[in-house]
Image (spheres, coloured by chain):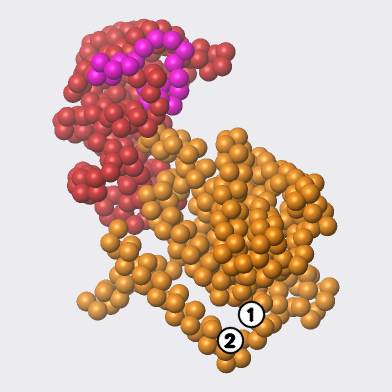
Amino acid sequence: MLQIKNLVVNYGAIQAVKDVSLNINTGEIVALIGANGAGKTTIVKTISGLLKPTSGSILYEQKNLQQKKAPEIVAAGIAQVPEGRHIFAGLSVAENLQMGAFLRRNRKSITDSLQEVYQRFPILKQRQNQDAATLSGGEQQMLAMARALMSQPKLLLLDEPSMGLAPIFIQEIFDIVQAIQKQGTTVLLIEQNARQALAIANRAYVLAAGHVTISGTGQELLANPAVQKAYLGG
Amino acid sequence: MKANFKYNIIWLSLMVVGFILMNTLILVGIIDSFLENMLVVIGINIILALGLNLVVGFSGQFSLGHAGFMAIGAYATAIITSEHPNTLNFYLSIIVGIIIAIIAAIIVGVPTLRLHGDYLAIATMGAAEIIRIIINNLKITNGPSGMFNIPKFASWPVVYVMVCITTIIIANFVHSRAGRAIKSVREDEIAAESLGIKTTFWKLAAFVLGAATAAVAGSLDASYLQTITPNNFGIMESISILIIVVLGGIGSLTGTFVAAIVLGVIDTALQSFGPLRMVIYSLALILIMVFKPTGLLGRYEISLPRIFARKKEAKS
């Protein structure tokens, strides 16, 4: 569904992503793990059109993405949950969710999506008229994911969904990611929490200093001694 | 959409009732020309502050250049109606003012709306100064001495109708899809962008609409006061509009109304105090900001849907 070939992304003079190639097949959860500064978020932002690649290509459903702007990419079915949640703190939970469907015009189908989202995240329904700022960290993460789902994505880009959450919420977030996959949405999961990410991923890539160093199925990487040493604490 | 239509009709009827009530009071003589003058000033300030609240409160772009766009409207009306004084030309001049203000807002907005916070405030302040200095140096605007004997077409009823139109347009904008877009940009630009919202476009849209309403207020101001000089539209004017917005509550249209009325009444009531007036006025502002830093109403709005929902609850 998504093929990245020889992607290079620069921030000014600094090369954050150096020659990265990776594949995401329809229906998979693909995990991208690596240390801080490895270039994970840069890749996500480049896919969603917030950054421009210096060279290389991104093919989504056989179409080139790099010339497209963020709104077109969202409309094409790629939704991003940005790192650090980035909910609209001063808007209500319901308004936050409506913003996720901003590019959709059919009111009826938006209402249907809203009901689906409320079914999957009952806590958000309870809090629909509250300001998003009053939610707990875990609830905010759920809101950010629910908001992205409101655009009916085929591919969901999750950037560090477990960051800064209590362990009980982390488990719940990973359960939700699996549930999203079961409903037919493909997921690219960026994580520092490598053990849990690998456990639910079909395939995974390890990114270090802007390069893909290791790749394989989630189970292979969990068993890989180099991965264990560097990312799973031995 | 249907529900919005219903609430708009209700608001419109309330406005008509208010209009009849006010005019009866004027006819009976309870509102004399002194009070009527106060009402006009309050009305013009409401239009100005609603537009600025859209920019500062809802789209979160801190602008200190509102008086510049007001000047454009004022001079458009002054020049056109001085040449050919008739009512049709007065309304035409309002439209001309709006169009020029929109063009100016686009020229100013495209480069400056990339900036944030203080930087944007300074850039918009600079832009307003440029407008003022251009007016100061043109022949057609009569330079620094300004224009006088401008024919008077703006009366209290005209101002009232303009306040109603501005309120309806801005309230509907704020509650529409566009309004949600500009609020999301205010809350978090990164998130808005990642959801496919064109952040620069929506910021510009709010800025341009705010500028257009400022031009309308300027037209009314010029036609009512009949005398304008470039110095009327300096930084102090921008700041006094901002004071109304901040005092009423950044992001509350109802608050803008309340603040404009409160300040207008205080200002009029203090007129007999002479120089002491500014001291008391400032003191009132300081006290309100100390005890209610979010403004008189914070982000509270009078909302018909909510009032109806409450009534239904009370019944059942």
Circle 1 SS class: helix
Labels 2 and 1 within one chain: yes
Which tint was used for chain B?
Answer: orange
Amino acid bearing label 1:
Glu
Please name the residue that numbered disc 1 is placed on: B36
Query: Residue A93 magenta-drawn?
Result: no
Q: Which chain hosts label 2? A: B
| Residue closer to the observer: B57 or A123 | B57
| Left or right for B71, reference A175 | right
Question: Visible in this render: residue B17?
Answer: yes
Distance, label 2 to label 1, CA atoms, is 8 Å
Query: In the rendered structure, which segment of residues is drawn in magenta?
Result: A46-64
Residue in the image at 70% along x and 77% along y = B268
Letter of the chain in red: A
| Residue closer to the observer: A208 or A11 | A11
Query: Split into 4 quadrants, where in the image is the C terminus of chain A?
Result: top left
Q: Residue furthest front?
A: B84
